[in-house]
Structures are given as structure tokens and as C-alpha cells.
Amino acid sequence: MNTSLVDFHCHLDLYPDHPGVVAECEEKKIFALSVTTTPKAWPRNRQLAGATRYVRAALGLHPQLVSERANELAIWKEHLSETRYVGEVGLDAGPRFYRSLELQKKVFAEVLRECARHGDKILSVHTTRAAKTVLDMVETLLPPPRGRVVLHWFTGSIAEARRAIDLGCYFSINAEMVANQRHHDLVARLPIDRILTETDGPFTTVGSRPRRPTDVTLVIDSLSQCLRIDSARLSTHVYDNLRRLLQDEGSHTR
Ligand code: MN
């Protein structure tokens, strides 16, 4: 079996060798969603991903940067028609970013409205300490027929996860989630047909080095133990989930 691996949330532009890590994904046949943290990073990401078979770039405005960069929302809107993928976007109500939460909500609401207006977008969404608000906003502004939401590093409650499942959301799971006991229990209860894998590299590390998309094999290993399923079968599920997610709206798969 020769299934491709999936890293549905990584920041390829934040590695010192951006072109090298893109080439590595291509060579190892790793489907990588390269999310961006600011719309200004979009053109370079788009350029490097554009020539590949396995790498996609997502247009983002990271909630942790909203306090300084909310004015780049106009640039984000200008580029939106150039991509099917949006991220990293969402809300962060953790102590460091709580002060900008109202502004984050305004930006995220506008992101969801614009995605709904365009249609057929796939979003990688950050929900730190804000799962309920994110789900409320998705339900109102981007319900399932208008777009697809993948919750990145989801740490909400089991009840919130159930609600997300009902809203059609997918979950991209990383090794840190599986290593954390509380989140491990949540991950173990997710339906296998909603699971994708991610590294969130280079923000996560393995030993002392930043994780790379190739380290998604380690996510598969720990997740297969968590879900008590053979790792080859898990890889096949994840890849099937990715294909279903990308094909859901029919027409194009890129
Ligand atoms: Mn991230």
C-alpha cells in the first residue's frame, strides 16, 4: 500500500529553508497544507506551492496577530479568490491574547462571511479557549453547505467536539494532543472519518528540533495507539478523509 501522508496544518514559510521543506513534501508525497499567519506571506507561499503536486497554501490571518495586523484584512480579502484554502484563522482567548478577543471576533466573522460568499473554501481554524464561540460563529456564518472547517489542535470539551461533528467539522490532530492525557481522551472519542493529521511545525518540536512534515509519521504512530488501530489502516483512513474533504463540493480537487 502506498498511501500519502497528510500534514494538514504546518507553517512551511517559517522554516529557514522554505523551498527545501516544500521539496521534501513533494519528494516524500506528503500532502501538506501550508497555512500562513499574515496575508503578506501569501504570495510567496502561493508561488512555492503552485508548482507542486502535494503542497497547498492557505491564506490566513492568525488570531494571535490580529491586534497588530487587523488592517491586513483588506489584503486577505483581495487574495481570497486565488485559493480554496484559508488559514490560519480563528480565535485565541488564552491569557496572552484575550485583550484582542473582540477585535479577533470581528476579523473572524468577516473571514467566515467572505468564505460563505465565495463558497467551496476549506478552513484551518484555531480555537484556543474559544471553542464555543468559534462553533457559534461557524454555525451562523459558515454552515456546512457554504464551506468546510477543519479544527486545528482542538482542545475543547467532548460536548463541544460533538457539536463540531454535527456541524460537519474535521479535526487535524498532532502528537502533542495525543501526548496530553485530557486531550488524548477526547481524540480517542472522535469518529475516525473526521480525523486528519498535522504537525503544526515548526511550532512543535521533536527532541530539540522543530518538527517537519515528514514527522507526521510519528503522529500516525501515536494516534494509532490512541485509537487502537493499525497504523497502515489509520493512514488509509486519514488519506480517504482528506480526499472526501477535498471532493465534497464536487468540481475541483486541487
Ligand atoms: Mn499553527
Image: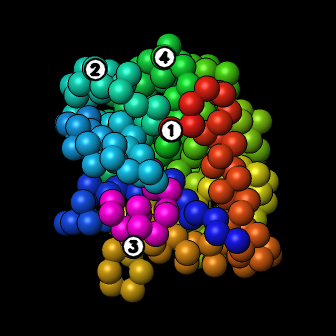
- The answer to whether marks 3 and 2 mark residues whose Cβ atoms lie closer than 8 Å is no
Q: Residue 211, labelled with which disc?
A: 3
Q: Would residue 29 appear left or right of 241 to someone viewing this image?
A: left
Give the tally of numbered discs. Answer: 4
Q: Nearer the viewer, residue 30 or 153?
A: 30
Amino acid type shown at disc 4: His
- Tell me the residue that label 4 is attached to: 118
Q: Nearer the viewer, residue 249 or 71?
A: 249
Q: Residues within 10 Å of mark 2 (few under 14, many from 20)?
A: few
Residue at the image position 34 percent from the left and 43 percent from the top: 50
Of marks 1 and 4, the one in the foreground:
1
Find the distance from the CA under tag 3 to the CA under tag 2: 32 Å
Q: Would residue 83 appear left or right of 112 to someone viewing this image?
A: left
Q: Which residues are magenta?
A: 22-33
- Tell me the residue that label 2 is attached to: 78
Q: Would residue 66 appear left or right of 201 to someone viewing this image?
A: left
Determine whether the residue tagged by mark 1 lies in a helix, strand or loop: loop
Q: Residues within 10 Å of mark 3 (few under 14, many from 20)?
A: some
Mark sitting earlier along the chain (3/1): 3
